Amino acid sequence: RRPGPLGMMSSTTMEKEFNILWEGGDILTSARKRVERSLKDNEASLDKSGVRSIYWRVFLGVLDQKSRDNWNRQLESDRKRYEKFRVKFTTNPTEKADVDLSLNNPLSLANDSPWQEYYENVELCKTIELDLNRTHPGNAFFQDKINQKRMLNILFVWAKLNPEYSYRQGMNELLSPLLLTVAKDAEKRPNQLPGGSSGAMIKSLLEEMYIEHDCYALFDRLMAYMKSYFAVAKPPARGGGRMHKGSIPETPIVVRCQNLQEKLLKSIDRVLYRHLENEEVQPTLYLLRWVRLLFAREFHIRDVMLIWDVILGNAVFKQDKMELPLIDYMCAAMCQYVRKDLLEGDNSMCLRRLLSFP
């Protein structure tokens, strides 16, 4: 067992933090109140709690928000599902039995040859690895070979299960805070935990051998909401007319960026909105990165995790669909934070300031 970045916590401290979830009787409400307290008191930061990943799993609906009675069943199901697909997608064709040898050979050009898929998988992994080498290059955690392998596996399996999106640059940025949080909590878990249901539950939730599996469950749930922001614009159909020169295809991320600047910011600060419009500052040039990566490139990763505590903590579910409404208001607040600099700048100065937080 490798020691965690901040060392192991005492069993009583971790149990106390964990039991906060049941104090009010309502798990989600208790979790949100704990986040509010962490914002007011640095000593109460979730970063020091050892159970932040459990809170995030509650916020994203990976764990039942109403009762913990189903948690063990959900854990087992998610872990088995991930393991099943990881094995399926990473099995070498030479290890497959009962396969037609006319197809199962490296020289076969048949479309249904397992080697064709194998070669495609190798190329996909190479693409992902290029981005992983650039993910937080100054952070030893992300340069660790074990963690890079975990990230590669998670992104690869997700891409295979979501071929309409596959892997796109930036998904690694969304994964990194999740992995850091899950790994830190698991590695800080004491070897000896109190007896009773709480101790047993903590042990199940923070198993170091399942860091990758549990992180995938979080990533998959987050991407159920975020994946549309990685959609690529389709070329116009024949006879559907031509796109005007300089126009931007209306993908979900483009629409949201436009609404943020042209509706929300306009309603909050008309003077700033007009200045950005007059300087022809296109909303996608700065908001696309903010929204698509959930501010992961704008702040230090420890601050990103604090921001995510709040954004994920205010997730709203409507008919099993998740919304993260605080993203819009975070963007507006960031524009207000640099308002003076923006009003004094031209197009290039505005963009430079908007893309160089804080």
Image (spheres, grey):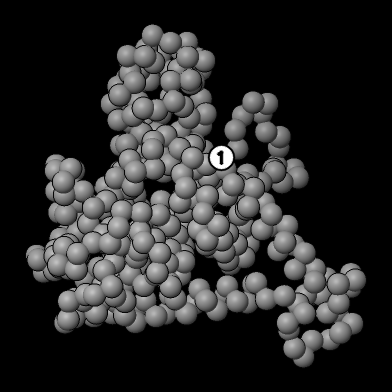
* Residue at left offset 64%, top offset 72%: 89
Mark 1 is surrounded, within 10 Å at the Cα level, by few (under 14), some (14 to 19) or many (20 or more) other residues, namely few
* Residue at left offset 29%, top offset 66%: 189
Answer yes or no: is residue 186 visible: yes
Q: x%, y% of residue 331?
A: 36, 34
Which residue is denoted by mark 1 in the rendering? 250
In the current view of this chain or complex, which residue is farthest to the bottom?
98
Which quadrant of the figure contains the N terminus? bottom left
Q: Nearer the viewer, residue 328 or 244?
A: 328
Please state if 315 lies on the left or on the right of 21 as rendered: right
Please state if 48 lies on the left or on the right of 120 as rendered: left
Please state if 39 lies on the left or on the right of 59 as rendered: left
Classify 43 as above or below 70.
above
Q: Nearer the viewer, residue 6 or 62?
A: 6
Q: x%, y% of residue 62?
A: 35, 67
Classify 41 as above or below 261.
below
Q: x%, y% of residue 345?
A: 43, 10
Amino acid type, residue under disc 1 in the picture: Glu
Q: Nearer the viewer, residue 242 or 259?
A: 259
Q: How many numbered callouts? A: 1
Q: Secondary structure at mark 1?
A: loop
* Residue at left offset 45%, top offset 37%: 297
Q: Nearer the viewer, residue 75 or 18?
A: 18
Please state if 175 lies on the left or on the right of 152 as rendered: left
Q: x%, y% of residue 283?
A: 48, 28
Which quadrant of the figure contains the C terminus? top left
Answer yes or no: is residue 151 visible: no
* Residue at left offset 49%, top offset 37%: 289
